[in-house]
Image (spheres, rainbow, N blue to C red):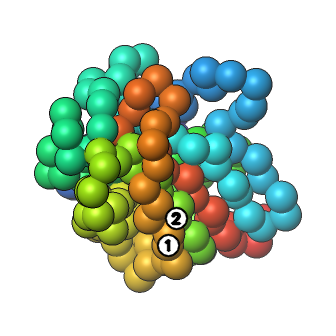
């Protein structure tokens, strides 16, 4: 991605590269801007066009690995925000995070998995990254992804 600013400099400090926007796998767009808000579509943990891990958390996928994957989802969500906002420095705050965890029967650690996304937003955006959140266990996700994250951010005025 071209451009940069304080947020992308912070990502670089953390040793993280902002990925390209993940192309949609169905009939939707990665993000939509409405006024000062950007709503992302659910982001699965695609890396370089590939899903690095598949399966249910608590079965084929460990909770620790799922937390790492939630962090990747959060990075993909930031890339989607940048695609419509133009600059991540325009993020006034992350308003809401919704995380879905493909869960094996009996797995109840969804909040700890989605902490991977929440912690990334805090690490990168500081106080602006604090948000309301839901962490939901589901039977299955697209492509058999273990986790999916969507966000709503508020932008500064134009």
Asked if residue 110 is positioned above or below residue 64 in the image, the reply reads below
Q: Is residue 124 visible?
A: no
* Residue at x-position 27% and y-position 57%: 106
Q: Is 124 left, or right, of 137 in this rendering?
A: left
Which residue in the rendered view is the most extreme toward the bottom? 127
Asked if residue 126 is positioned above or below residue 33 in the image, the reply reads below
Q: Position of residue 116 (x, y in %)?
A: 28, 58
Task: Label 1: state its secondary structure.
Answer: strand
Task: Label 2: state its secondary structure.
Answer: strand
Number of the label disc, if any, that sits on residue 95? none
Query: Residues at badges 2 and 1 in contact (C-beta under 8 Å)?
Result: yes
Please state the total of marks drawn on the protein image. Answer: 2
Label 2 CA crowd tier, 10 Å (few <14, some 14–19, many 20+): many
Q: Quadrant of the C terminus?
A: bottom right
Label 1 CA crowd tier, 10 Å (few <14, some 14–19, many 20+): some
Q: Nearer the viewer, residue 49 or 4?
A: 49
Mark 2 vs 1, N-terminal side: 2
Q: Nearer the viewer, residue 23 or 14?
A: 23
Quadrant for residue 72, please give it. Answer: top left
* Residue at x-position 70% and y-position 57%: 38
* Residue at x-position 46% and y-position 37%: 140
Asked if residue 62 is positioned above or below residue 39 in the image, the reply reads above
Q: Position of residue 104 (x, y in %)?
A: 29, 45
Q: Nearer the viewer, residue 108 or 76?
A: 108
- Residue highlighted by disc 1: 133
Q: Position of residue 138 (x, y in %)?
A: 47, 49
* Residue at x-position 37% and y-position 18%: 50
Q: Is residue 105 visible?
A: yes
Q: Is 138 left, or right, of 113 in this rendering?
A: right
- Residue highlighted by disc 2: 97
Q: Position of residue 56 (x, y in %)?
A: 30, 38
Q: CA distance from mark 2 to mark 1?
A: 5 Å
């Amino acid at each position: 991605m071209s451009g940069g600013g304080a947020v992308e400099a912070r990502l670089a400090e953390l040793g993280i590269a902002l990925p390209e926007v993940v192309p949609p796998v169905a009939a939707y767009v990665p993000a939509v801007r409405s006024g000062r808000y950007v709503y992302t579509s659910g982001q699965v943990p695609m890396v370089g066009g590939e899903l690095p891990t598949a399966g249910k958390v608590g079965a084929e996928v460990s909770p620790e690995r799922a937390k790492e994957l939630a962090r990747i989802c959060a990075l993909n969500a930031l890339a989607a925000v940048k695609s419509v906002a133009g600059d991540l420095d325009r993020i006034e705050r992350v308003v809401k995070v919704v995380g879905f965890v493909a869960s094996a029967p009996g797995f109840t650690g969804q909040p700890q998995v989605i902490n991977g996304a929440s912690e990334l937003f805090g690490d990168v955006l500081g106080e602006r990254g604090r948000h309301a959140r839901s962490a939901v266990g589901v039977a299955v996700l697209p492509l058999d992804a273990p986790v999916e994250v969507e966000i709503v951010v508020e932008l500064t005025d134009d």
